[in-house]
Amino acid sequence: MKKILAIFCIAVLFLVLIMKNDDKRDISSDIPILAFGDSITQGYGAKDDESYPSQLSKMLNIKVINSGISGEVSSLGLARLPGVLAQYKPKIVILCHGGNDILRKQDLRLTKQNLAKMIELIRENGAEVVLLGVPTLKGFGVDTASFYDELADEYNLVYDDTTLEKIIKTPSLKSDQIHPNKDGYLLLAQNTEKLLKKNFNFIP
């Protein structure tokens, strides 16, 4: 009886693992990943080859396009996005935007709307969205802005809500008050790699 129960448990576990693997989406490793955002995507505070897209590209052995513009607000990012999607035709877009809206104390309801439109544009162009949440000051602490959580829930996104928050809270990972340094970008790349491999099968 114990042997039968053990075999049954192993079979159930095997089926669960298969089902989890089936949830992953197949993505060709020949198609570049697009990293779209502002200064954090661009790699401000580090050398070009130390940005998170550059380090992520080496980890995955897949080309990662760095489409980050320092200082860009979400309204300008939304205007720029269609041309970038048309140029590169990605199947995965890592979206990390809205930080400058937060810093400039813009209406974050509009920021959320702009990001929602970006997500919809990306999906309309046949690509998956990976969202990176950006922190904001909350009282005397730092927390990922709540509208990123809302967007992740509303659109059922692959989402990282902790890494940038951790970097901002850790002086040794920053080049200034708001930007990562080489080690901070490395951590962002490592955690993004884990997130991608958890949710996608990269097919040669």
Image (tube, helix red, strand yellow):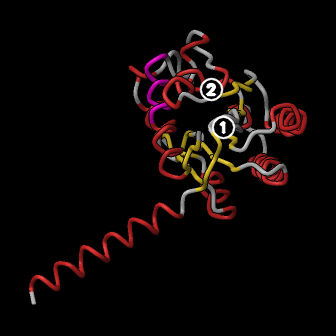
Tag 1 near tag 2, CB within 8 Å: yes
Q: Is residue 49 magenta?
A: no
Q: Secondary structure at mark 1?
A: strand
Quarter in which the C terminus is drawn: top right
Of the pair 103 and 65, the residue shown nearer to us: 65
Q: Residue at x 75, y 23 (%)?
A: 69
Quarter in which the N terminus is drawn: bottom left
Q: Residue at x 64, y 47 (%)?
A: 27
Q: Secondary structure at mark 2?
A: helix
Of the pair 184 and 71, the residue shown nearer to us: 184
Q: Earlier in the sequence, mark 1 or mark 2?
A: 2
Q: Residue 40: which numbered mark, if any?
A: 2
In the image, residue 179 sits, relative to residue 19, either above or below, namely above
Q: Residue 88: which numbered mark, if any?
A: none
Q: Residue at x 63, y 56 (%)?
A: 157
In the image, residue 103 sits, relative to residue 127, either above or below, namely above
Which residue is the extreme one toward the left? 2
> CA separation, marks 1 and 2?
8 Å
In the image, residue 55 sits, relative to residue 126, either above or below, namely above
The answer to which image quadrant residue 90 occupies is: top right
Taking the image as shown, residue 6 lies to the left or right of residue 187, namely left
**What's under tag 2, amino acid-wise?**
Ile
In the image, the segment drawn in magenta is 182-190
Q: Is residue 168 at least partly visible in the picture?
A: no
Q: Residues within 10 Å of mark 2 (few under 14, many from 20)?
A: many
Q: Residue at x 74, y 26 (%)?
A: 67
The spot of residue 86 in percent (x, y) is: 88, 36
The spot of residue 56 in percent (x, y) is: 54, 28
Residue wearing tag 1? 96
Q: Is residue 19 at least partly visible in the picture?
A: yes
Which residue is the extreme one toward the top? 47
Q: Residues within 10 Å of mark 1 (few under 14, many from 20)?
A: many
